[in-house]
Image (tube, rainbow, N blue to C red):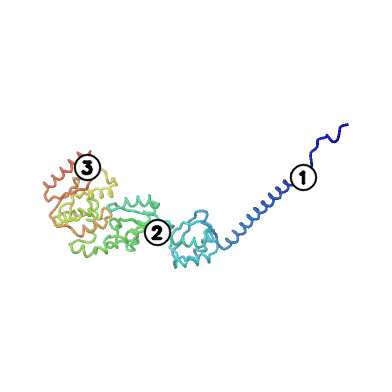
Amino acid sequence: MADRDHISWISPEPVRRAKSAVAVALSLVILLGGLGFASWKGYSFYMDLMQHDDYIGDGDQPIQIIVNEGDWWAKVADNLVAKDIIKDPSLFETAALAITDGPTPGTWKLFTHLPAKTAAEMLTDSANLVKIVLTLPEGKHLLDLYSILISDVGVTQDQIDQALAANEADPDANIFGLNAAANGNLEGFLFPDTYFLFPPLNTDVISIFKMMAGQFNEIATELDLDNAADAIGRSPHDVVVVASIIAAEVDSDVYGAQVARAIYNRLDIDMPLGVESAFRYGRMMTDGTPYDDPITVSSQNDDSLPYNYYMHPGLPSTAIDEPGRDALTAALNPADGDWLYWVTVNLNTGETKFATTEDEFNELKNEFDTWCADNGNPKGCQ
């Protein structure tokens, strides 16, 4: 039998200590987990409490709303609640009225889940208003405008045609608000400018034409078109036609007044205008020939063509494009001179020279031909 005093054994004390440590650790984990769960529940409760009548934060998903003409803040507030943008309409209305009396109609960019005050601030900041920029440069004609409307605004050719048909069906109604000198024709009387459109309020064709016609009327008033035309012995309509030729031919603010004088000099002696731009426009509108197609010598000599202003004296029956302020000003204020001809001798700089006799004109034409040959005959030389 072995001696008990020499038998090896492990004391139970360390085991008890290890078990106690594990128990304490487990308790701590449970305690911390409980505290975390409680904290999360507390935060959720806090958020629910805080957002009971209003959202907090910077919003969630992008959204657009339409404010119609005549809407007041109360109606806007109800719409915002329905779209889950705000919670309490009264909070929003109070915040909005503190900024401005009423909303601006249009389409507005917002977010869902916005605080009422933030929504009010966004709905009074024009940076959040959806807009379309429409630019019609000076010297462009109606067909150019139609293309711009289709590409930049999103209207269709059918919508344009319907608006034009409505105007033609009842010209006395003047649904576009055209100047009286227009005689119902849009060409020349829709002012070339940059316009801001706010869908869906003014992005239909009739509204756009009314806006552009209204801008022409404002400029006409500023220039005193009727009285100023009468002072130079011309009708307002003829002044606009001359201005449209100026816009097509030269840099209006540099050479416009001289071209105006040359045109009036020709009209006064019943001399055909001989203006390329008028021929091209008439051919395009009558025959559908693209504006930039070459002009043949045979067509220049064909007096059966109603648009052949190389052969027929007088002005075109309508403007040939949309003239701007400079062209209109030039047409109303012709320079003093006896010129009958002008030639742009450098297409890069637009330099234009004037002549009184046909021999002088031929010299300028030779100068232009030389420039074209030296510069590879670019577009405009043909």
Residue 88 sits in quarter: bottom right
Q: Nearer the viewer, mark 2 or mark 1?
A: 1
Disc 1, SS: helix
Q: Residue at x 18, y 48 (%)?
A: 343
Which amino acid is tagged 3?
Answer: Cys
Q: Position of residue 91 (x, y in %)?
A: 52, 65
Which residue is label 2 attached to?
202
**Element under label 3?**
loop
Q: Which mark is residue 16?
A: 1
Task: Tell me the residue that label 3 is attached to.
Answer: 381
Q: Is 3 or 121 nearer to us in this picture?
A: 3
Q: Residue at x 20, y 41 (%)?
A: 372
Mark 2 vs 1, N-terminal side: 1
Disc on the earlier residue, 2 or 3: 2
Residue flagged by tag 1: what amino acid is it?
Arg
For marks 1 and 3, give the one nearer the viewer.
Answer: 1
Q: Looking at the image, do the residues carrying marks 2 and 3 touch, with CB atoms under 8 Å apart?
A: no
The reply, left or right, for residue 261 in relation to residue 106 is left
Compared to residue 150, the image places residue 202 above or below, namely below
Q: Amino acid at mark 2?
A: Asn
Q: Is residue 202 left or right of residue 26?
A: left
